[in-house]
Image (spheres, grey):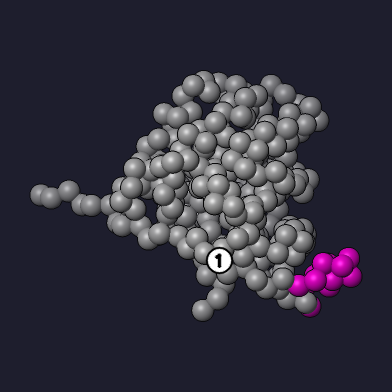
Amino acid sequence: MTEQAAPPLLPLDEDWESALAVVAHPDDLEYGAAAAIARWTAQGKRIGYVMVTSGEAGIDSLEPEKCRTVRESEELASAALVGVDVVEFLGHPDGVVEYGPRLRRDIARTVRRHRPEIVITTNFRDTYGGVFPNQADHIAVGRATLDAVRDAGNRWVFRELTAEGHQPWGGVRQVWAAGSPDARHAVDTTDHFAAGVVSLQAHKAYLKGLGGDPANVAAFLEPMARAAGEGLGVRYASSFEVFSLRF
Ligand SMILES: [Zn+2]
């Protein structure tokens, strides 16, 4: 019996200058995507972060009113470590984000303002490739992000955005979902794996709340990066599911 080889992953398109990452919570990008972000900002690409919530329900021992500012400041520090200095928070409620027109409109507004070529989000499939279920906010936000990219380009959807001065933007070529079990693409992060590790370690209060040791962050991230790297033929990589908005 021969062992089945992991399916090869295709290299992501890097012929772009501007991306916007839209995720549910502070820390979502740091579980694998941050190393790729570090690579791209090192190339001179411009990337902004949008957090749909402030992750205020993420620390059991800290009430949301206090937790919000802690997690926002940890995300700002985390982003800065991978070359991102624009982080916005949309203020939707952590844990109970609802997919719907309001969420799509708020994301479409950020897409129109930033005018990116690539939009990055996280896995919004039902599971992480097996029995481990995805989290409800991730599913709502990923799905809404994909839809909001189309909304951003349509003048007649969310007409209030145009009235606010946000002109339609149809320039997004692809949406990339990090950590998807259906990923078929990846990018080499061998030289930026360490930046990804410190970016997750910046979530000090959050990791402490989970009972984890920040020293173990590298050991947690390494197998995922190595598995994606094997698919790409490099040491470490970040994988993404690619949705093309253009034929
Ligand atoms: Zn999350």
Say what amino acid the circle numbered 1 marks.
Answer: Gln
Query: Which residue bears the numbered disc 1?
Result: 174
Q: Nearer the viewer, residue 155 or 37?
A: 37
Seen from the viewer's position, the closer of residues 99 and 2 is 2
x%, y% of residue 25?
65, 42
Identify the residue at horizontal 53%, vertical 55% (top origin). 177
Residue at horizontal 73%, vertical 35%?
72
Q: Residue at x 31, y 57 (%)?
A: 8
Q: Does residue 196 appear to the left or right of 18 in the view shown?
A: left
Q: Nearer the viewer, residue 197 or 161?
A: 197
Q: Of helix, strand and loop, which mostly describes the magenta segment?
A: loop
Q: Is residue 11 above or below residue 198?
A: below
Q: Secondary structure at mark 1?
A: strand
Q: Position of residue 180 (x, y in %)?
A: 47, 52
Relative image position of residue 103 (x, y in whole percent): 73, 57
166 lies above or below 192 = below
Residue 200 within the magenta-colored segment of the rendering: no
Residue 227 visible within the image: no
In the picture, residue 170 is in which quadrant? bottom right
Magenta stretch contains residue 162: yes
Classify mark 1 as within 8 Å of ligand 1 or not, answering yes or no: no
Left/right placement of residue 131 relative to residue 22 reads: left
Q: Which residues are magenta?
A: 156-168
Residue 26, image x, y percentages: 65, 39
Q: Is residue 170 above or below residue 200?
A: below
Residue 185: name its quadrant.
bottom left
Q: Is residue 4 visible?
A: yes
Residue occupying image coordinates x 37% and y 60%: 10
